[in-house]
Amino acid sequence: MDRSEKAELTVLCMIYDGDEILLQNRIKDSWKGYTLPGGHVEPGESFVNAVIREMKEETGLDVFNPILCGIKQFPINDGRYIVLLYKTDKFSGKLISSDEGEMKWIKRSEVPSLPCVNDFDKLLKVFDNDELSEFQYAVRDNKLIPLVY
């Protein structure tokens, strides 16, 4: 039995400032709505360096000391898609938007009223609860079932 599998590695980062978080209003039809900025880990790149690079590319901000706070994963053809979840309140620079979508500071109390990506509420649970560390889509009866651990 082969114990290895193909994995696509990505990162998301919650940049926060008091009661506000930085969200991206994504415009791609495949994942449309408000979510956290992020992107793919390049071959050979450290995960922390991927977070720092992606935040600079998508937000214009330099982030410091991003903390790993969880993992999101779901099955893909012949493997799995893994998203490493980071957060930080240490940043500098001037906020920009990218071709991925517009960046906005949003009060946490306003998030439920926004048109967010499908699973954003479950994703936030992992960021907000130190007792949770994983958000997984498991396959049951040929359906994807969201599970938060």
Image (cartoon, helix red, strand yellow):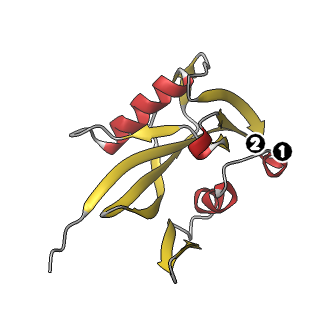
Residue, far left: 1
Left or right side of 70 for 103: right
Quadrant for the N terminus, please.
bottom left
- How far across and down, in percent of the image, does residue 143 sit? 55, 75
SS class of the residue under badge 1? Answer: helix
Disc 2, SS: loop
Q: Residue at x 30, y 64 (%)?
A: 78
Crowdedness near tag 2: few (<14), some (14–19) or many (≥20) residues, C-alpha within 10 Å? few
Q: Is residue 62 visible?
A: no
Residue 128 quadrant: bottom right
Figure check: 140 above or below 28: below
Q: Which mark is residue 110?
A: 1
Task: Give the amino acid at mark 2.
Answer: Asp
2 or 1: mark nearer the eye: 1
**Residue at left offset 72%, top offset 47%:** 116
Amino acid at circle 1? Glu
Q: Which residue is mark 2?
A: 19
